[in-house]
Image: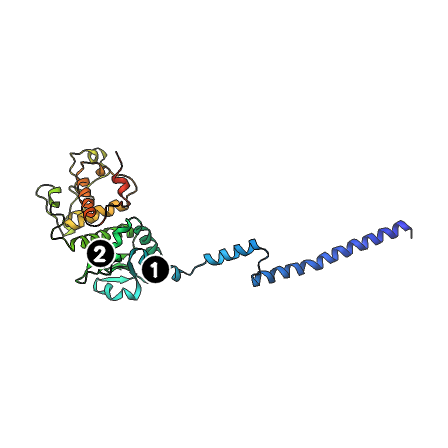
Amino acid sequence: MSKQNSLDQKSEHKRLSIITDILLLIPFIVATFIILKTVNIPLSNEASSEVLSLETEVINIDDENELLIRNIKNEFGITVLYGKDVAPFAKRLDAKEQEDKYIINNNLRVIYNALYKYPKDVFNMTLSRENPTYIMLVDHFENNNLALASRNNLDEYRIYVSNTEKLERAFHHEMYHVIEYYMRKNKTTLYENWDSLNPEGFEYVEDTSQIDKKYVYDAKDIQKSMSLDNDYYFVTRYSKATDKEDRAEIFAELMIMTQKQNYLAKGQKIRNKIDYIFDTIKANITGNEFYCSKYLNEQK
């Protein structure tokens, strides 16, 4: 055998030995990685912070619901109840309590965000021990109601809201009723000139099946709605049920508004009602701005 052939064989043996070592090392590396991952040992400071971050973001749905309820109570003074805590009240109102934790989570998120549309000092009334306020989550009402508000002789306020796509609007409607309950506590008269803002001879009709569309705002009729001589006095048909529902419907529309409507122009008949509502709130609760103030203050 030549010297060159001998060298070539040694080189080949060395190369094969290196390859064999690498092949033997790969399973060891993989096994080590799996063990480290299993026991969650960080490979560096950066990896450690990522693991901690992910762990802190994971939250149980029940824990999140309780956190939202606690925040609503601490920030706004309002107690939220659902499930078995609502059942005795719901039964008397022909309603079914809400028990689905995922629906409850969505309802709580909607309500929590809706409450931020109010100036903070509105909640001086609910933060007071004199006016315990509750939001009662129900699945539905058997009588087709969406929501309702009540006040008892202990001055406890309860807002019942059902799980519908109109939940936020319904909540604002009932929240206005609570605001008016509060304003009436120490007032012998409130909105005593309200009827003067309605058509001459108009009377509210509590039987909603008898309410027609006359005097109700129609956004599609742009030319008419822009005229100060139009006959629009109400934002919805339901506004024509009672004077209290009229005000609550106006308030609810304003609190979910996403663009300015023609009836907000100064001199419009509905705008006159709006100004009366907010002048009354300013005189009795707060002069600070609500979510809808940006539309009321816009110059057309």
Q: In the rendered image, is residue 145 in sight?
A: no
Say if 218 sits above or below 117 in the image: above
Q: Give the mark toward the camera: 1 or 2.
A: 1
Give the camera-side residue of 200 and 213. Answer: 200
Crowding at dot 2, Cα within 10 Å, few <14 / some 14-19 / many 20+, comes out as some
Residue 79 left/right relative to 7: left
Crowding at dot 1, Cα within 10 Å, few <14 / some 14-19 / many 20+, comes out as some
Give the camera-side residue of 194 and 119. Answer: 119
Residue 227 place in picture, x, y as percent:
19, 33
Residue 95 place in picture, x, y as percent:
24, 61
Residue 164 left/right relative to 233: right
- Which residue is rendered at x = 68% and y = 58% of the image? 26
- Which residue is rendered at x = 49% and y = 56% of the image? 54
Q: Amino acid at mark 2?
A: Leu
- Which residue is rendered at x = 81% and y = 53% of the image? 12
Residue 272 place in picture, x, y as percent:
17, 40
> Which residue corresponds to mark 1?
70
Q: Amino acid at mark 1?
A: Arg
| Quarter of the picture holding the C terminus | top left
Residue 261 place in picture, x, y as percent:
25, 39
Among the two numbered marks 1 and 2 on one chain, the one whose residue lies closer to the N terminus:
1
- Marks 1/2: CA–CA distance: 23 Å
Point out which mark residue 148 bears.
Answer: 2
Task: Identify the colour scheme used.
Answer: rainbow
